[in-house]
Amino acid sequence: MSAPRGHFPENFIWGAATAAHQVEGNNVNSDSWMLERLHPSLFREPSGDGVDQYHRFADDMAIVSGLGLGAYRFSIEWARIEPEEGSFSQAALDHYQRCIDHCRERGIRPMLTFHHFTLPIWQARLGGFTDPDFADRFARYCEHAAKRLAGFDLACTINELNLPLFVRDGSLRRLQRGRGPERIAAAAAALGGSVDHFFLFTPAEAIRDQGLAAHARGRDAIKSAHPHCQVGVTLALQDEQAEAGAEPLRDQRRNDYYGVCLDGVAGDDFIGVQNYSRVVSKRDGSTGPEEGHRLTMMGYEDRPQALAETCRFAWERTKTPIIVTENGWAGDDDRRRSEFIVEALSNLHGAIVDGVDVRGYFYWSLLDNFEWVVGYGPRFGLIGVDRGTMRRAIKRSATQLGEIARANGFSEEQTDASAAAKADTSGAPVGL
Ligand code: BGC
C-alpha cells in the first residue's frame, strides 16, 4: 500500500455498527419480535435466529480486530435486560459484560447503544414513548444496566430519536392501501391499542417530550455510573437540498425533522450523525431522489457526498462534536460499496479540514442483517452471512475499510479512485 494521504485527526475512531435485534436472534421479549409474528404483519418476515451474533460475538470480534477496526458499536437489549417491568436479568447483563470484554481483549473500543428501536413488550403495552412515565422507566433501566456494566467509555442513549418525525406519517399513509389497514389493526391490538406504541410510529409530541427527556435522564444515569463515558444520542439526518425556489420547503423539513432534536441535544458530549443519502425538495412541493440518479437497494439515492454535507449542517447548527455512528450502502455490488465508503470518507475529510469537529466513523453495518420491516433483503454488511450455516464471508469493502483505519487515512490509489468518481457525480448544483 502506498503512503497514506489525507490523514484523519489523531485518535479518530474507526469502527462498524450493528443493533441487537438485527443480529442477535431470538429477541423474544421485544415488541418487534411480537409484531413480526402476527398474521398479517407489518414485517415482511420474522427475525428468527438473526445472524446468531448472540452466540458468535467473540468470533465476530476476532474478525473486526483482524480487519484493523478499532471500535464496534452494538446495542444492549432492554427487552432481555428487563423482560418484565422491574425484574432485571443478571444473566443478560453478564452476557453483555462478556461482549464488552471480548471487544477489549481484542483491542476494540466498545460503543454501547441503550435503545435501538425495540422495547420490551410490557413497555410497548404501556404506550412505548407515549407513556407519560417513559423517561422514568428508561432512566431506571439505563441506571441499572450502567451500574452493572464496566469497561466502556462511549455510549448512545437512543438510536435515531428523531426518526419517527419523518417516517411515521408517510408510512401510516402508505399503509392505508391493500392489506395495510388489517396489518395496522393487528399490530395495534398486540401493542395494547395503538401502533403509536411502536417506536417508528411514535407521534411527534411524544418524541419532543418523553423522547428528549428520556435521552437526558438516560445520559445522566449512564454518566453518573461512568463519569468519563462520552454519551450522546444518535439522529437520522438526511442531506436536505433544494431546487432553486424550493428552499422554504427544505428549511421547513430541516426544522420539523431535525431542528428540535438537534437543538435539544446540543452541548452533549457528541451527536451521533447517521446518514444514508440526500433528499431534494422540489418546486412542485414534492421531494425525492434526483431523476436519473442511481439508487441503492433501499431505494435511496446513491449519494456518498451526503454524509459530509450532513455533518456540516449538524455542526453549524449545534457546534457539538460529531461521531458518525452510521453510514452505509445497501446492495450486492461490493465494488460500489467500497467506492461509496472512500467517497463518503474523502468528503468527510474535507469537512474536517474545514473545521467540522468529527471524531469517528462507524460503517453500517458490520454484517448483513435483519433490516426491520423489509427483512433480510437489503444487504449493508461489510461481512456477508449465509443464514443456513451462519458462516461469515468477509467482503473486499471490509478489508478496505480496515486498511483506511490502520493508516488513519487513504492510500493514493484510494484518493485517486475517489477523485475520479467525484468528478463524475458530485458538485452539480441541484435541479438547475
Ligand atoms: C438504523 C438501522 C438500519 C439502518 C439502515 C438506521 O435507520 O439505525 O437499524 O438498519 O438505518 O436502514
Image (cartoon, helix red, strand yellow):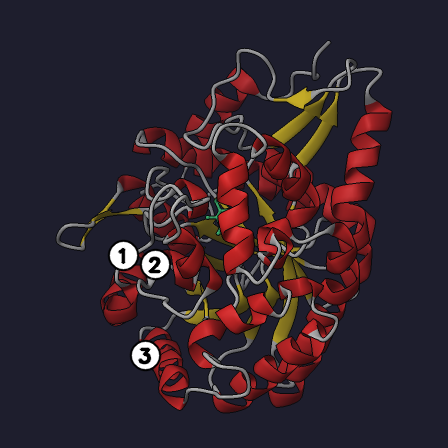
Q: Amino acid at mark 3?
A: Glu
Describe residue 245's horizontal placement relative to residue 404 as left or right: right
Q: Nearer the viewer, mark 3 or mark 2?
A: 2
Q: Quadrant of residue 240?
A: top right
Numbered disc total: 3
Describe residue 306's horizontal placement relative to residue 357 as left or right: left
Describe residue 158's horizontal placement relative to residue 45 as left or right: right
Q: Which residue is mark 2?
A: 23
Label 2–label 1 contact, CB within 8 A:
yes
The crowd level at tag 3 (other Cα within 10 Å; few <14, some 14-19, many 20+) is some
Which residue: 68% across, 72% down?
A: 134
Q: Could you tell me which secondary element the residue under label 1 belongs to?
A: loop
Label 3–label 2 contact, CB within 8 A:
no
Of all residues, the one furthest to the left in this rendering is 389
Front-lying residue, 157 or 305: 157
Give above or below for 190 relative to 87. Answer: above
Point out residue 149 in the picture as x, y percentages from the top left corner.
Answer: 47, 86
Mark-to-mark CA distance, 3 and 2? 21 Å
Which residue: 31% across, 43% down?
A: 1
Q: Could you tell me which secondary element the residue under label 2 belongs to?
A: helix
Mark-to-mark CA distance, 2 and 1? 5 Å
Compare marks 2 and 1 and give the one earlier in the sequence: 2
Q: Is mark 2 within 8 Å of ligand 1?
A: no
| Quadrant for the C terminus in the image | top right
Q: Which residue is mark 1?
A: 51
Point out residue 65 in the picture as x, y percentages from the top left corner.
Answer: 31, 64
Compare marks 3 and 1 and give the one earlier in the sequence: 1
Mark-to-mark CA distance, 3 and 1? 23 Å
Q: Amino acid at mark 2?
A: Val
Decide if residue 305 is in sight here: no
Point out residue 52 in the picture as x, y percentages from the top left corner.
Answer: 26, 62
